[in-house]
Amino acid sequence: MAVQYLDAKEPHVCLYRDDTEIILTIANVPRVMPNRELYGYGYDAYFITDRQEALQQEFLDAGAKVVRPLSNTDYHNHEFVVEDIDGRWLGFGLKGI
């Protein structure tokens, strides 16, 4: 579910799913720079979920860009990564697999 506060003094949108709230704001820069470009690696957000397979399929069905399909990492997470419209990488996984 999305709730828009675009006419507020500080415009933003709140996204809700399960027990997660994400707040989106407008960047006051010409281009958003993803963490992997700033630091050479890293995601811009990481969400813990035990439904990786179903969630990845939901993203694929919606046409999302999956940049790292579901797999086990060398740091023992089971995760996949999508890229948002600003080039940020969002990880979805479960720690300690």
Image: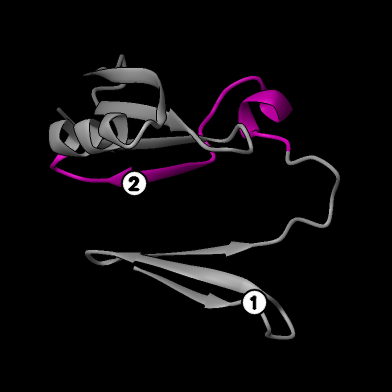
| Front-most of residues 12 and 42 | 12
Mark sitting on residue 47 = 2
Q: Is residue 94 left or right of residue 35?
A: left
Q: Which residue is mark 1?
A: 6
| Picture coordinates of residue 32, whole percent (x, y) | 73, 41
Toward which corner of the image does residue 20 lie, by quadrant? bottom left
As measured in the structure, the alpha-carbon distance from the residue carrying label 1 to the one carrying label 2 is 25 Å
Residue found farthest to the bottom: 8
Placement of 48 over or under 62, stated as above or below:
below
- Looking at the rendered image, the quarter that the N terminus falls into is bottom left
Query: Do the CB atoms of the residues marked 1 and 2 lie less than 8 Å apart?
Result: no
Q: Is residue 14 magenta?
A: no
Quick one: which residue is furthest to the front in this view? 62
Secondary structure of the residue carrying numbered label 2: strand
Mark whose residue sits in front, 1 or 2:
1
Q: Quadrant of residue 2?
A: bottom left
Q: Which residues are magenta?
A: 33-51
